[in-house]
Amino acid sequence: MADTTTIPGVSGWAGPLDQRGWLTFKRLPKGLQDAWDSRIYADFVARDQVRDATETEIALLRHLRVIVPMDYPESDPRYSPTLLTKVTYVTATLRNLSWPALAGQTPTDPKA
């Protein structure tokens, strides 16, 4: 099923109830941080939207032991070749990310 690979250098997870969403960390490795920062800017410009999840988001979700739709066998009704990210701005600058297809799952800190 899911590739629950722990990503070295990712630390300081804020937990599943953070107002910014599941993918809130204190530290990301440089390559992931650069991709994350680029997406933050693109989301800020586009504002509230539903878009395809980025490779970075999918990797971080897997890091948190979440099973994404493409990890299921194609014969499973939960399978999908894509994952949609819902971007909502709670305030003028506070971005929240969520994934409707992942409802019912709870991310887990791999260091716990």
Image: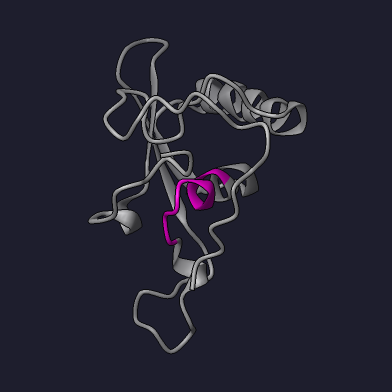
Determine the residue positioned at 55% across, 28% down: 11
What colour scheme does the image use? one colour
Q: Residue furthest left?
A: 104
The magenta stretch is 60-67
> Front-most of 103 and 7?
7
Residue 38 quadrant: top right
The percent position of residue 40, horizontal first and vertical second, equals 57, 24
Q: Residue at x 33, y 58 (%)?
A: 101
Of residue 17 and residue 91, the one placed in the foreground of this image is 17
- The relative height of residue 33 versus residue 79 in the rendered view (above or below) is above
Relative horizontal placement of residue 104, taking residue 93 as reference (left or right)? left
Q: Looking at the image, which residue is at 42% across and 37% down?
A: 49
The image shows residue 109, relative to residue 68, as above or below, that is above
Dividing the image into 4 quarters, which one contains the C terminus? top left
| Residue 30 occupies quadrant | top right
User: Is residue 71 found left or right of 21 in the rendered image?
Assistant: right
Residue situated furthest front in the rendering: 112
Q: Residue furthest bottom?
A: 75
How many labels sit on residues? 0
x and y, in percent, of residue 81 in the image: 53, 70
Residue ID at (72%, 26%)? 34
Residue 106: within the magenta? no
Position in image of residue 99 (x %, y %)? 36, 48
Nearest the eye: 30 or 53: 30
The single residue placed furthest to the top in the displayed view is 92
Q: In the rendered image, which quarter is residue 92 located in?
A: top left
From what the image shows, is residue 56 above or below residue 38? below
